[in-house]
Every structure is written in structure tokens, then in C-alpha cells.
Amino acid sequence: MEHFLENGKGSLSEKVVLLDFGGQYSMLIARRVREAGVYCEVLPYNTPWEVIQGHNPAGIILSGSPASVYQEDAPKCDPAVYEGGVPVLGICYGMHLLNIDLGGEVKKGSRSEFGRTSFTIEQPEPLFRGISINDEAVCYGWMSHQDEVLNPPPDFEVLAWTENGTVAATGNRQKNIYGLQFHPEVVHSPCGEDVLKNFLYKVCQCSHSWTPRSFIDDAVARIRRVVGENERVVCALSGGVDSSVVAFLLDKALGSRAVFIFVDHGLLRLDEAKEVARLFKEGLQGQFIHIDAREKFLKRLEGVTDPEEKRRIIGNEFINVFKEKALSMGDIAYLAQGTIYPDVIESGSAYGSAVIKSHHNVGGLPEELGFELIEPLRELFKDEVRLVGKELNLPDAILKRQPFPGPGLAVRIIGAISAGKLDLLQKADAIFRNEVEKAGYKDELWQFFAVLTDVQVVGVKGDGRHYGPVIALRAVVSEDAMTADWARLPHELLEKISARITGEIPDVARVVYDITSKPPGTIEWE
């Protein structure tokens, strides 16, 4: 699916195409390019040159890969990439590939290089312009490779050598084709940001057109072009950051012709439905509709223990309730929703991606829904969505709201769901959130929440043995939810939270803290 914005205009007037060879840092490279002010679009490694050329790229980046270029089934790009007159930057595997394709030699190295490695710059122009440490032509990069370039292709020069004598960077300045052995996109490469900017601005001649303001201007203009003067748009509003930014974009573009429907499935955090309703009634010009469907959802979920079945039931019921209300309004032509790029990837809608989350709207809407779909944030990462929201002057109560799963607390209650379990979890979660906020850690965390496990354990309450459920606490730090690390909250804070939960909620017998990162775990438990 094309980006919601039209190619060749405004914020997309210049673009870098990243060919993804399956490296774990492909999405991070794209984010770093965007952070530098240039739009970057990720395409499969085997995309034909005609398609790549149709994007009119200012530059092309070849990503890393777990493969080796001398393998029989090694992934390769269209050879025309090197002959199209567009600057090319190969990173790690991408460097090995362009070297092999253009007549160089790559072999398995005599020693692998992993982690921080110093390298000496032989030729500063153009990638290493202005880069040095203590006025010396030395810098550091993060390496992760077993293969190395033995001989660069004809007419290529070595731009930098590692401390171990391997090629750290190579290039052909006449053809504007360059390769980096290290990963400039990771924070462990202190010169990486400058190297990427040199490629974007010195080599590709980009002009910093990708900004939150330019995105908003383009999105608003496009919404107005797509939606007829007498047509209305309905927005599925959850109260989270993504759907909220979409709502305010629609509000800016269409005013009273936008309708916002909030389906309260009863699986939100304590008092959250009331807070969402208040914020949007006050902040939007269009009609806000609050549908109380709590009893209907709980009845449909009764006795269901399988997490995927929970997701399917909640997703289907949400669509049914939403559709019934939207269709009853008679003249709705379009549906807007807050799909973002990680949703696309983790729902299996992106090329070659596995299904990690099945509860996203991506790919889950029935064909007979009856509306044209508008997804203005589909190509944005979460941090970009927040920047757009800030530019739209959204209140912090929305912008700083932590991500919340579509099925809500249904996937934080392990096993069957009941009104009693839901009430217990809402109270435990509220205590956790309250204490984290009072301690000043809220803004440092990506997500923090409580999980009601299906484990019953023995405890001691009131001088007697007590059997009750275990509450698990989960707190993570992340930039975009693609990866996450568990938060090192102070022991004293965790102790206080545990004491409050076990003391104020009689049924709870024990509190535990989850110290699993993503990967290998996920952020949510189900």
C-alpha cells in the first residue's frame, strides 16, 4: 500500500529507499534517516529497479543481513541499482554485496569483529567530513560481522581501516557508491549520525524536508482532496496516542464533518473511559459519540481462555458495534484509524514479516465494512507520531499516555475473564501507575502495567493461610516497541507497590516483577 501522502510533494519531495535484506537493524536505519530530516521508505531487497526508480529516490541504502554474500542462496538486489545514477550506501552485508556485485572480493574473516571497534580514516571526503576524535583521524564504530572485504572493486578506494586491519569503509566517489562495515545507525557508533548525515546531505544533496510540520500540512491537504466537500469521515477512537493524532488531523482538515466514535468495551484501565470522553468532548470540533458496550463484551468473552480467541472476539465485536453505529448515521464515506508502521510489520502486512500481533486493525477489517479507509499515520514510527501530535498541540494527557493494547486488559488477565477479575486488575494496575508517577519515573518508561496471572499461591493474611492470585508487574523502556528492555525500578519502589497491592486488595497473595526483555519476550503477556 502506498503512503497516504502523495509522492513527489511536500514532505515526500525527497526520499531515500532502504532495501531490506533481513537485518535486525533495518527499521532502525530508516528511523535514523527520518530523524535526520529525510523521508525513508523500506522496500524488499528484491524489488525490481523499475519499481525503485518509480519512487524517484535521492539515495539508496542496502541494509545488513544474517546471510553471507558467498552463500548459494544469498539475497541480492537488482544489479541495475548500481547503474541508475542514484547514490548507494551499503551497510555491513550491504557493503559486502555491492563489493561482490561490482567485482571485489569478500571472504570469511580470520577473526570476527563484534562491538565497539576503532577505525582510522584514510579519506575523509565525503562520508567522514568533519569527523575525528581529538583532532585525529580516528573514530569508533559498532561492528557485528564475521565476513570482511578482502579486495574492493576496481576504481574503489579504502576510506577507513579498523584497528584489526580490515576494511571499515570503501567507496567510489565518481559513482557515489559507498560501503560501511560498521553500523552507523546504533548509538554505540558515536560518529554514525554524522556519517549518515554526510551521505544524505553531501552525497544525496537532500534538503531536510521531513518534519512534523511538513507532514501535517501534506496530510491535511491530502485529506481535503480525498474527502468530498459534502462527505463525512468517521474515526475509530481509542484514546491512545495514534488514534488521537489521527483525530486531531481530521479535526484540522474537516472540522465538524469528522465524527469520532469511542467504543467502551469495559477493558480499559480504572476510570480511563471517563477521562477519554472528557478530553475529546472538550478538544474536538466534530461529533463525539461514546458507546457503552461493557456488558456485551464481557458476555462474549465469558469462559474464553485462549488469547488469540480473545483477540478475535474483541476485534469482531468492536467492528460490529462500531459498524452498527457508523452505518446508522447514513452519510459516512470514509473510516480513519490510527495504524502506524510497527502495526503493519507486526501484523504480517509488511513484506516477509511474521504475524506477532493479530489484534491490530491492520488486515483485520472485513471487506464489507462499507467505508473507504484512511490511515494517515501508516508509515510513521511511534516517536514520529508523538512529534506530529506535539506539533498539533495535543495535551500531554494524550501525548504522554503509554501504549495500550487493542484488546485492553483482556490480554493482561491470563485465562478466563470475569467482572471480578477485571475489577481486581484495574485496582492493582492503578496502584502501580500511581506509585510510579509519584516517584517520578512515568516519563522514563515506555509502558508499565500489572498482569493478573492464572496462578494461585499460598500466602499468610490475618494470621491464617490464604490462597490467592499472583499479580505480575511489567515495566519496560523502549523507543518504538520493536525492542524493549525491562526497567530497573528501585527496590524500595517495588516494595512499596507490592505492599499496597497485597494490603489494599484482599484477594492478592503475591506480587512479582517481570525482568524479561523483548526479544526474547514480548511487552504484553498474551
Image: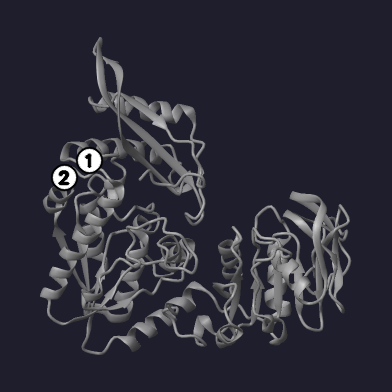
- Element type at mark 2: loop
Q: Which residue is mark 2?
A: 302
Q: Residue at x 33, y 58 (%)?
A: 240
109 vs 319: above or below = above
Total tally of numbered discs in the picture: 2
Q: Residue at x 61, y 65 (%)?
A: 29
Q: Residue at x 37, y 63 (%)?
A: 242
The spot of residue 156 in percent (x, y) is 85, 75
Front residue of 490/88: it is 88
Mark 2 Cα-neighbour bin, 10 Å: few <14, some 14–19, many ≥20: few
Q: Residue at x 46, y 68 (%)?
A: 350
Please identify the residue farthest to the front as the structure is shown. Answer: 72
**Which of the numbered marks, if any, corresponds to residue 277?**
none
Q: Where the N terminus falls, by quadrant? A: bottom left
> Left or right: where does residue 207 sit relative to residue 363?
right
Front residue of 526/408: it is 526
Marks 2 and 1 close (CB-CB < 8 Å)? yes
**Rendered image quadrant of residue 154:** bottom right
Mark 1 Cα-neighbour bin, 10 Å: few <14, some 14–19, many ≥20: some
Identity, as a three-letter code, of the amino acid under mark 1: Ala
The spot of residue 195 in percent (x, y) is 73, 67
Please identify the residue farthest to the top as the structure is shown. Answer: 463
The spot of residue 392 in percent (x, y) is 39, 70
Identity, as a three-letter code, of the amino acid under mark 2: Glu
Of labels 2 and 1, earlier in sequence is: 2
> Left or right: where does residue 67 sit relative to residue 499?
right
**Which of the numbered marks, if any, corresponds to residue 416?**
1
